[in-house]
């Protein structure tokens, strides 16, 4: 199969053609957002971090910023810094250039006439990139160029028996077509990690699966949190989920049935084909953020309770297996997947419908989150401010 995409100088293929105006820290966020709001085709986001962080947290932030600029959906980047932050533009720009040779501009607010001067200069750069991007025509590419992320949030009793197995069918199809599917949310593997490990392509990958779960649980214990006691969340319980194992067994259905080829650290570039795992938190925006930083051009996100979350760079397709949720939040949800619960459709039939919808989205159809401008991001933090 083929999809329409935009070829980048680094050989990757995007399903969107964004100009990214990227703040390196919270001081630059509003300025970057004002620049993007003035240029058609430009996107930005609210960065709450980038300074006053412990070293491990700085690395998370750096990996996300660099990964966002390198994501194939981005034509080029205008990097906006303040001038004294830990995640400075020189550092971030150098790492971006190591990952990709796409167009890049950069400026500091302290050196470019403050907010007004930076907005003026940033608009010029963003407009120049937008004009170039508008000249690029999409072409057909095979699925070996596609990376799909999978996510679930606000899970309920329908998630594990309908929506997530349907996503799993799409995952299997993407893998069969030569592409890559990412299974995420390490905290929601707990209680089912042995099942994932049994699906690893070899002992080394199986060991990595078990290690990320045990390491994450130990980190939470060190932070005085017992995830096996705190999970399921109150909303999960209200939706009918009774235990962490039940939630985890539902979560891993998003990964379909194919062997696991590799396990990646949060936000690291995904370079293997087939089903892979990324070590992400259960927090929805942060998990999606990591997969997009790793190169995912599209994300499918199930939610039994409903959520409007999107992403500034990758289209996020929302599905729910709960007809009541769809009745309340259909304006935010792209596909109502309750047929697997009611018996009106099989999981395989709905998997084909969702795959077709995913193909429409990567070929240009906008998701509900895109139409509403939902561009939430989240970057994990391990430590308190320093």
Image (spheres, helix red, strand yellow):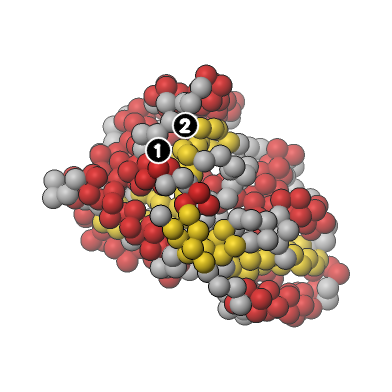
Q: Disc 1 vs disc 2: Cβ atoms closer than 8 Å?
A: yes
Q: Which quarter of the rendered picture does the C terminus lie within?
A: top right
Quick one: 218 or 300, which is closer to the camera? 300
Image x and y of residue 26, in percent: 69, 59
Residue at the location (13% across, 50% down)?
A: 344
Q: Disc count in the image?
A: 2
Residue at the location (44% across, 58% down)?
A: 2
Residue that sits furthest to the right in the current view:
111
Mark 1 or 2: in front is 2
Quick one: 320 or 234, which is closer to the camera? 320
Residue at the location (57% across, 68% down)?
A: 17
Q: Which residue is mark 2?
A: 260
Lower sequence index among marks 1 and 2: 1
Relative to 150, residue 134 above or below: below
Instruction: Please say whether residue 64 is visible from this viewpoint.
Output: yes
Residue 307 horizontal side relative to residue 276, left or right: left
Q: Which residue is mark 1?
A: 255
What separation in Å lies between label 1 and label 2 (alpha carbons)? Answer: 9 Å
Residue 306 horizontal side relative to residue 372, left or right: left
The secondary element bearing badge 1 is classed as helix
Relative to 365, residue 296 above or below: above
Relative to 364, residue 218 above or below: above
Image x and y of residue 137, in percent: 55, 73
The secondary element bearing badge 2 is classed as strand
Instruction: Please say whether residue 164 is visible from this viewpoint.
Output: no
Image x and y of residue 78, in percent: 71, 67
Relative to 81, residue 277 above or below: above
Image x and y of residue 326, in percent: 26, 58
């Amino acid at each position: 199969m083929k999809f329409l995409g935009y070829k980048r100088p680094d050989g990757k293929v995007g399903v969107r053609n964004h100009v990214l105006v990227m703040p390196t820290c919270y001081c630059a966020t509003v300025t970057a957002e004002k620049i993007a709001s003035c240029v058609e085709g430009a996107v930005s986001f609210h960065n709450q971090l980038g300074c006053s962080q412990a070293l491990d947290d700085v690395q998370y932030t750096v990996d996300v910023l660099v990964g966002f600029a390198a994501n194939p959906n981005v034509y080029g980047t205008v990097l906006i810094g303040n001038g004294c932050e830990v995640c400075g533009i020189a550092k971030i720009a150098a790492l971006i250039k190591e990952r990709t040779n796409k167009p890049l501009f950069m400026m500091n607010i302290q050196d470019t006439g403050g907010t007004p001067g930076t907005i003026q200069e940033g608009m010029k750069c963003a407009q120049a990139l937008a004009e170039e991007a508008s000249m690029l025509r999409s072409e057909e590419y095979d699925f070996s160029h596609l990376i799909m992320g999978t996510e679930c949030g606000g899970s309920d009793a329908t998630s594990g028996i309908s929506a997530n197995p349907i996503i799993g069918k799409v995952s299997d199809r993407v893998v069969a077509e030569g592409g890559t599917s990412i299974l995420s949310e390490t905290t929601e593997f707990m209680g089912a990690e042995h099942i994932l490990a049994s699906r690893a392509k070899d002992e080394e990958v199986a060991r990595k699966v078990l290690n990320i779960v045990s390491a994450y649980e130990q980190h939470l214990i060190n932070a005085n949190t017992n995830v096996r006691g705190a999970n399921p969340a109150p909303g999960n319980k209200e939706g009918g989920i009774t235990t962490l194992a039940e939630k985890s067994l539902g979560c891993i259905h998003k990964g379909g049935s194919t062997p696991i080829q590799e396990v990646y650290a949060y936000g690291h570039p995904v370079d293997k084909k087939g089903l892979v795992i990324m070590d992400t938190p259960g927090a929805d925006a942060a998990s999606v953020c990591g997969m997009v930083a790793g190169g995912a051009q599209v994300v499918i996100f199930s939610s039994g309770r409903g959520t409007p979350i999107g992403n500034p760079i990758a289209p996020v397709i929302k599905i729910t297996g709960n007809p009541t949720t769809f009745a309340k939040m259909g304006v935010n949800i792209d596909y109502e997947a309750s047929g697997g619960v009611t018996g009106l459709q099989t999981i395989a039939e709905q998997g084909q419908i969702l795959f077709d919808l995913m193909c429409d989205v990567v070929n240009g159809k906008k998701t509900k989150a895109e139409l509403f401008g939902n561009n939430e991001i989240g970057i994990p933090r391990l430590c308190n401010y320093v």
